[in-house]
């Protein structure tokens, strides 16, 4: 169950979570771009609102006279309406300067005015609106300044003194007043306790301070404002120091933001091994609005769901496993009984039969008991057959002794032979006898196969060998020896073994080198082939198979057998060799094969070797169902 349910369930869950993660990544990409767009719009709207407020003050009639009391009165009114802002006025030549609010200091000194003027890149055309970051000594705390030029009155059209009217907002309040903080909370799911990134914390590397959400406003020179009211002013001051930023953890993020070239872009940055997704929107002024979140915070809900699913799956798997184990335990006890019984049977210990009840388990026990009983019967029979097999092995060893090991060789005749039984014991045989320079060769095939045929073969072989020797001693004539020996053997086999219905086909020949004559009798046997140069002929039949008819005549034929002539004798196992589809090798293939060369180009051993190879190729692994015997002689 574990090997099937666990891989399938884990595979399905993994696939589902992967698909969910893909969708979350796509949704996160869309939402980050939307969030940074919303924050950028909020900042732009805030800037536009500041400019509108200052323009209303700039057109005040009290500023037409440019006296200190009138200017201060306007600044006090603005501060009363917007207490979070500090207000200031700067003349172009620095003669008049007023400020209201705690964030500006030293505006009355000429050096501070010049510093402030250079910081705003004082416009030659006074219709340019500008915004900048003020730091010490110009401002007591870092603030974001917005300025407008004092323009001509739209009603009078008359010119008036040039200067700048501006506000300064403490950076810690900018995120709230611009609405960026609320947008960050909305991006993080509306959680008031959303975790904001603080890479300025000295222990932030790979800690909780490095994870969460953040919104930045990055200036082209590398300064940036972190839209987070929780940060200390000292952190915001460090963010306005380009050299300090380059050695801080913020450097990879700020570099990636400044390197962005498209109006809007989503990129990925790694800081201290933590992956961040960073959405960037670039304004025409070069300032960039940025929203970033680490991957774990972005997929917090998905990761929580994944852990919950895996935990639920593990609990369910344990409970189901316990239940299955309990149920299977009750079902497996009878199977254990069967297993122990089968194990004992495999060791040869049969013991008492299992109890057979009238149910499914009872039938199972009955089958085991039947198998046990049959196995016992088989073992008894197997022991009996073991003795027969041992006798069969011994019979094969004895039969192998009947086959001549060393064929007689003379300087006038070359002989080669091959024998392969179909079963353990064969019924074919061959023989070769050298008597007084005359070589007798025999190839015979007893009907049927197996042990009965082998027994008949042993009697037949011994009797024929004895008869050839006796008749030669009596006549010293090859023709007479073959004729009388065949009659003697046939009469004996018919008289003593005719009732068995067994018989044998025989080819027996005698080669007399002094006469260069081959005498032979073909008694119901496959007709041997005689190759003389390129001329091929079949030897003539000389009588029926031996052991069937008493008084049968056997005719001895003879043929010239000169130097180089080649004789091939074989049993029916050669032409009857079948292919896998049942096609026999056939006598025509034997003839075609033998006549590929002249008799002078063959040797007996080469002929048999190539012929056996050709038949094996024809059989192509099919079973050999008959004994195969080959014998070849060649005159030297």
Image: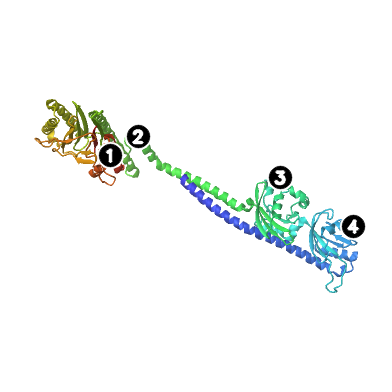
The x and y percentages for residue 545 are: 15, 37
Q: Nearer the viewer, residue 124 or 58?
A: 124
In-image side of 250 versus 616 (left or right): right
In-image side of 323 versus 436 (left or right): right
CA–CA distance in space, label 1 to label 2: 48 Å
| Residue carrying label 4 | 110
Give the image quarter of residue 336. top left
Q: Nearer the viewer, mark 4 or mark 3?
A: 4
CA–CA distance in space, label 2 to label 4: 112 Å
Q: Nearer the viewer, residue 131 or 362?
A: 131
Give the image quarter of residue 392. top left
Tell me: residue 544, above or below residue 411: below
CA–CA distance in space, label 1 to label 3: 92 Å
Give the image quarter of residue 330. top left
| Residue carrying label 1 | 611
Specify whether residue 144 is in view.
no
CA–CA distance in space, label 4 to label 3: 43 Å
| Residue carrying label 3 | 203
């Amino acid at each position: 169950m574990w090997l099937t349910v666990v891989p399938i369930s884990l595979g399905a869950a993994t696939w589902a979570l992967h698909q969910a993660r893909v969708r979350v990544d796509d949704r996160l990409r869309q939402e980050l771009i939307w969030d940074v767009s919303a924050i950028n719009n909020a900042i732009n709207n805030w800037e536009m609102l500041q400019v509108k407020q200052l323009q209303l003050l700039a057109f005040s009639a009290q500023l037409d006279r440019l006296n200190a009391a009138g200017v201060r009165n306007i600044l006090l009114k603005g501060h009363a309406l917007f207490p979070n802002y500090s207000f200031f006025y700067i003349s172009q030549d620095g003669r008049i300067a007023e400020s209201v609010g705690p964030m500006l200091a030293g505006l009355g000194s000429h050096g501070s005015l010049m510093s402030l003027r250079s910081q705003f890149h004082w416009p030659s055309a006074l219709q340019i609106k500008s915004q900048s970051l003020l730091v010490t000594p110009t401002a007591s705390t870092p603030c974001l300044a917005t300025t407008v030029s004092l323009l001509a009155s739209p009603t009078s059209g008359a010119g008036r003194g040039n200067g700048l009217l501006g506000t300064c907002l403490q950076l810690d309040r900018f995120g709230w007043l611009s609405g960026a903080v609320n947008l960050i909370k909305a991006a993080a799911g509306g959680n008031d306790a959303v975790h904001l990134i603080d890479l300025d914390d000295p222990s932030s590397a790979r800690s909780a301070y490095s994870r969460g959400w953040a919104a930045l406003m990055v200036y082209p020179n590398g300064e940036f404002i972190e839209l987070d009211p929780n940060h200390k002013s000292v952190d915001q001051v460090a963010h306005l120091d380009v050299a300090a930023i380059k050695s801080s953890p913020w450097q990879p993020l700020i570099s990636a933001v400044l390197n962005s070239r498209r109006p809007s872009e989503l990129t990925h940055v790694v800081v201290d091994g933590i992956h961040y997704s960073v959405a960037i929107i670039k304004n025409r002024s070069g300032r960039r609005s940025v929203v970033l979140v680490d991957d774990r915070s972005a997929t917090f809900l998905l990761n929580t769901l994944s852990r919950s699913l895996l935990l639920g799956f593990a609990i369910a798997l344990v409970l189901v496993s316990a239940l299955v184990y309990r149920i299977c335990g009750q079902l497996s006890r009878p199977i254990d009984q069967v297993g122990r019984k089968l194990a004992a049977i495999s060791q040869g210990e049969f013991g008492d039969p299992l109890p057979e009840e009238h149910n499914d388990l009872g039938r199972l026990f009955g089958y085991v008991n039947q198998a046990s009983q049959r196995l016992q019967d088989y073992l008894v029979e197997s022991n009996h057959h073991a003795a027969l097999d041992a006798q069969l092995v011994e019979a094969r060893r004895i039969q192998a002794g009947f086959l001549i090991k060393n064929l007689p060789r003379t300087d006038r005749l070359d002989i080669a032979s091959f024998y392969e039984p179909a079963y353990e014991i064969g019924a074919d045989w061959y023989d070769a006898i050298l008597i007084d320079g005359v070589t007798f060769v025999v190839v015979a095939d007893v009907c049927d196969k197996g042990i009965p045929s082998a027994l008949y073969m042993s009697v037949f072989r011994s009797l024929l060998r004895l008869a050839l020797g006796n008749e030669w001693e009596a006549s010293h004539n090859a023709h007479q020896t073959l004729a009388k020996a065949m009659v003697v053997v046939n009469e004996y086999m018919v008289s003593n073994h005719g009732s068995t219905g067994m018989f044998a086909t025989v080819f027996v020949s005698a080669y007399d080198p002094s006469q260069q004559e081959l005498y032979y009798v073909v008694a119901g046997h496959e007709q041997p082939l005689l190759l003389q140069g390129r001329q091929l002929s079949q030897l003539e039949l000389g009588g029926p198979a031996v052991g069937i008819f008493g008084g049968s005549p056997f005719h001895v034929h003879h043929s010239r057998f000169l130097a180089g002539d080649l004789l091939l004798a074989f049993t029916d196992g050669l032409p009857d060799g079948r292919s896998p589809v049942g096609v026999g090798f056939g006598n025509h293939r034997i003839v075609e094969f033998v006549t590929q060369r002249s008799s002078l180009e063959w040797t007996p051993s080469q002929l048999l070797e190539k012929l056996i190879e050709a038949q094996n190729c024809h059989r192509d692994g099919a079973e050999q169902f008959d004994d195969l015997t080959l014998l070849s002689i060649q005159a030297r």
